[in-house]
Image (spheres, rainbow, N blue to C red):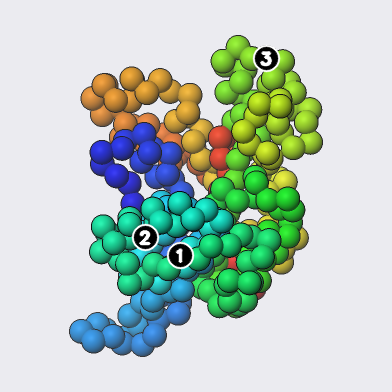
Amino acid sequence: MSDPLRPRASLRTAVVWEVLKDALDRRAKAVGQGPAEGAGEGAPGVLDVLDTGGGSGNFAVPVARLGHRVTVVDPSPNALFALERRAAEAGVADRVRGIQGDAHGLFDVAERGGYDVVLCHGVLEYVDDPAEGLRNAAAALRPAGTLSVLAAGLGGAVLARALAGHFTEARQALADPAGRWGAGDPVPRRFTAEQLTALVEAAGLEVGAVHGVRVFADLVPGVLVDTEPDALEALLQLEAAAAELPAFHAVATQLHVLAERD
């Protein structure tokens, strides 16, 4: 999914994409639709994937390129227009469908219990009720379906403000129930790993893995990554190595939770 012309973008999405791709592969094998033409017994099946808040298709289009059907629900008409264009350019327009809607009224536009995999990336920070948003995402899953949740991490924001010299704002974020550093904070809500996994479990899902995302990427000067030979690849490997270690979840810019419906 990474764009070779946008190395910083690749750096910020690589960990989530690798985890998600593995989960999609496992789920596709589990729901295999029998032998396909030219394939052996147990060929992977085509998944129905719901991407809530999927915007312009940062994940939806790469998922469709794997051969799966993706429905994107997003409140922004402009984002959905960009999604349509992006899917056409990638040659997957027949496998990507964009619908205007939001997590609160999800089942006004999406099918309850109709999806093998649901993505809930960058949604819980902005909805009025994160618990309801996760319950809706869980209810959209078929039995044994997989949920991928990506949300803003509290620790990463505190660390970033402190390193920028904004110590009062860093302390404010620590004390604020929503993890906001002030009135000018563009993110309405942030989570600790414990808070996020508790929300997922309360929605009736079993947490399979937790990853810290962008542990180092937002702190390393861009000029270093862009100009030093092999720096990008080395930083990608460092991010991947730290992602599963609980010690680094507390300082990650984002948190990723992979869960399954029983």
Q: Which amino acid type corresponds to the residue marked 2 in the rendered image?
A: Glu
Few, some or many residues within 10 Å of mark 3 (<14, 14–19, 20+): some
Few, some or many residues within 10 Å of mark 1 (<14, 14–19, 20+): many
Q: Quadrant of the C terminus?
A: bottom right
Of tags 3 and 1, the one toward the viewer is 1
Tell me where residue 41 sits by quadrant: bottom left
Of tags 2 and 3, the one toward the viewer is 2
Residue 98 image label: 1
Q: Nearer the viewer, residue 249 or 254?
A: 254
Q: Nearer the viewer, residue 213 or 238?
A: 213
**First in sequence: mark 2 or mark 3?**
2
Q: Which residue lies under the disc numbered 3?
A: 167
Q: Which amino acid type corresponds to the residue marked 1 in the rendered image?
A: Gly
Q: Which amino acid type corresponds to the residue marked 3 in the rendered image?
A: Phe
Q: Position of residue 158 (x, y in %)?
A: 64, 25
Q: Position of residue 67 (x, y in %)?
A: 33, 70
Whether pointer 2 and pointer 3 mark residues with C-beta atoms closer than 8 Å, the reply is no
Q: Is residue 238 left or right of residue 126?
A: left
* Dot 1: element: strand
Q: CA distance from mark 3 to mark 1?
A: 42 Å
Q: Position of residue 209 (x, y in %)?
A: 57, 54
Residue 73 image label: none
Q: CA distance from mark 2 to mark 3?
A: 43 Å
Q: Which residue lies under the disc numbered 2?
A: 84
Query: In this rendering, is residue 262 above or below 254?
Result: below
Q: Is residue 125 visible?
A: yes
Q: Nearer the viewer, residue 180 or 30?
A: 180
Q: Is residue 25 visible?
A: no
Q: CA distance from mark 2 to mark 1?
A: 7 Å
Whether pointer 2 and pointer 1 mark residues with C-beta atoms closer than 8 Å, the reply is yes
**First in sequence: mark 2 or mark 1?**
2
Residue at coordinates 33% horizontally, 57% vertically from top-left? 85
